[in-house]
Amino acid sequence: MAEPEVPQNEEEFAALLQEELRRLKVSDVLVQTVFTLSSLGFERVAGEARDLGQAKLAIDALRGLLPVLAGVVPAEVTRDFNQMLANLQLAFAKAAKEAAATPEPPPAAGGGDATPAGEG
């Protein structure tokens, strides 16, 4: 396989970028975006970087993108993406239920602004 051409100056870089953009299809970018959003969504639902607000945003974005891809990508890809979205929604619902069932920890002793009774 040939090594990619390394641009020597700004003009060569711009020409290479222009050529890549000519070859790139919007459907390819959308498919990659679906993969990225699903990965982020699952990470925000169950990973160390849990953030249910961000997970919901990923779900909402996927719900908007997937109908756009229907008929543009093969039917089995659409089916797999819809299944992935369903799995993400189920994981989100489970995480949201767990978060609602977990009480907030009480403030640390001595760490609040309240003055203890009898002082003040």
Image (cartoon, helix red, strand yellow):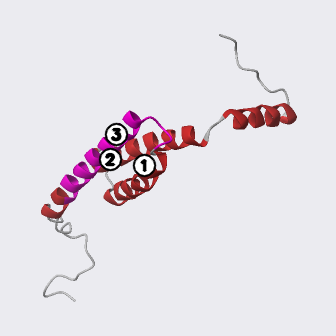
Identify which residue is drawn at 70% across, 15% down: 3
Which residue in the structure is indicated by mark 2?
85
Which residue in the structure is indicated by mark 3?
79
Tell me the element at label 2: helix
* Quadrant of the image occupied by residue 35: top left
Which range of residues does the magenta coloring cover?
71-96
Residue 41 percent location from the top left of the image: 36, 48
Circle 2: residue type: Leu
Q: Quadrant of the N terminus?
A: top right
> Is 23 placed above or below 99 here?
above
Circle 1: residue type: Leu
**CA separation in Å, label 3 and label 2:** 10 Å
> Pointer 3 and pointer 2: residues touching (CB < 8 Å)?
no
> Pointer 2 and pointer 1: residues touching (CB < 8 Å)?
yes
Disc assigned to residue 66: 1
Disc assigned to residue 15: none
The numbered mark, 2 or 1, whose residue comes first in the sequence reads: 1
